[in-house]
Amino acid sequence: MNLTVREGAESVVMLRVQSTLPLRFEQHPGARFPLYTTASGKAILAYSADAEQYLAALPDELPPVT
């Protein structure tokens, strides 16, 4: 589980709690991801006053991250 904050158009991992399950996604503190690529980034956008501006500024074709 991660705690992330928004910094501009990115979500930044601030705190990471390791899962005890064998299948997990590794995101280390300080890692940065575009908001549109993570569940936490999408949740942040859902409650952001400037979400429409953010979405309008995205390019027509988004670069894949995976």
Image: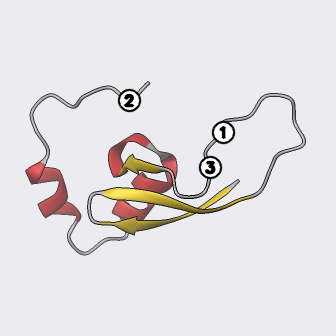
**In the image, which is nearer the foreground, mark 3 or mark 2?**
3
When the figure is inspected, residue 27 is found, relative to residue 45, above or below; the finding is above
Residue drawn at point x = 77 percent, y = 57 percent: 17
Residue 4 locus on image (x, y percent): 53, 63
Residue count near mark 2 (Cα–Cα under 10 Å), binned few <14, some 14–19, many ≥20: few
Label 3 neighbour load within 10 Å: few <14, some 14-19, many 20+: some
Residue receiving disc 3: 28
Which residue occupies 34% across, 56% down? 10
Q: Quadrant of residue 52?
A: bottom left
- In three-dimensional space, the C-alpha distance between marks 1 and 3, rounded to whole angstroms, equals 6 Å
Place residue 59 in its image quadrant: top left
Say left or right for 20 vs 8. Answer: right
> Disc 1 on helix, strand or loop?
loop
- Going from N to C along the chain, the mark reached first, 3 or 2, is 3
Q: Is the C terminus in the top left, top right, bottom left or bottom right quadrant?
A: top left
* Identity of the residue drawn at 78% across and 28% down: 23
Give percent across and percent down for residue 16: 70, 57
Q: Is residue 39 left or right of residue 7?
A: right
Residue on which the image places disc 2: 65
Q: Is residue 9 left or right of residue 53?
A: right
Colouring scheme applied when the structure was drawn: secondary structure
Mark 2, secondary structure of its residue: loop
The answer to whether the residue labelled 1 contacts the one labelled 3, judged by CB atoms less than 8 Å apart, is yes
- Secondary structure under badge 3? loop
Depth order, front residue of 39/24: 24
Q: Give the number of the disc on residue 26.
A: 1
The amino acid type, in three-letter code, at marker 3 is His
CA gap between label 2 and label 1 equals: 14 Å
- Residue 49: image quadrant is bottom left
Measure the C-alpha gap from mark 3 to mark 2: 16 Å
Residue type at mark 2 is Val
Which residue lies most toward the right here? 20
